[in-house]
Amino acid sequence: MQIPTIVGAGLIVIGAGLGIGKIGGSAMDAIARQPEASGKIQGAM
């Protein structure tokens, strides 16, 4: 009974990591396009 719980927790961690990476990557792209807005972008993160 413990294996599905472990697999589920692993999938949750992988999904969260991908989501956080996507947020960071998109923020870096936005800052590269508009460096003057970096404070607002970092604040929104």
Image: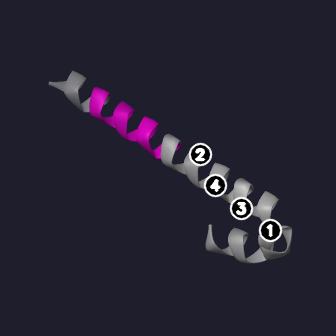
Q: Marks 3 and 4: in contact by CB < 8 Å?
A: yes
Residue type marked 3? Ala
Disc 3: which residue: 30
Tell me the quarter of the image containing the C terminus.
bottom right
Residue type marked 1? Gln
Query: Which residue extends farthest left?
Result: 1
Question: What's the distance in space between the residues labelled 2 and 4, CA to CA?
Answer: 8 Å
Question: In screen coordinates, is 8 left or right of 32?
Answer: left
Query: Which residue extends farthest right?
Result: 36
Task: Label 1: state its secondary structure.
Answer: loop
Tell me where the magenta segment starts and ends, as one range.
7-17
Disc 4: which residue: 26
Q: Position of residue 32 (x, y in %)?
A: 80, 58
Q: Would you identify the image quadrant in which residue 21 lies?
A: top right
Task: Label 2: state its secondary structure.
Answer: helix
> Which is more N-terminal, label 1 or label 2?
2
Work out whether residue 16 or residue 27 is closer to the camera in this orientation and state it: 27
Q: Would you identify the image quadrant in which residue 35 lies?
A: bottom right
Q: Position of residue 17 (x, y in %)?
A: 52, 42
Q: Position of residue 23 (x, y in %)?
A: 58, 55
> Which is more N-terminal, label 4 or label 2?
2
Question: In screen coordinates, is 26 left or right of 1?
Answer: right
Question: What's the distance in space between the residues labelled 4 and 3, CA to CA?
Answer: 6 Å
Q: Position of residue 7 (x, y in %)?
A: 30, 27
Question: What's the distance in space between the residues labelled 2 and 1, CA to CA?
Answer: 20 Å
> Which is more N-terminal, label 4 or label 1?
4
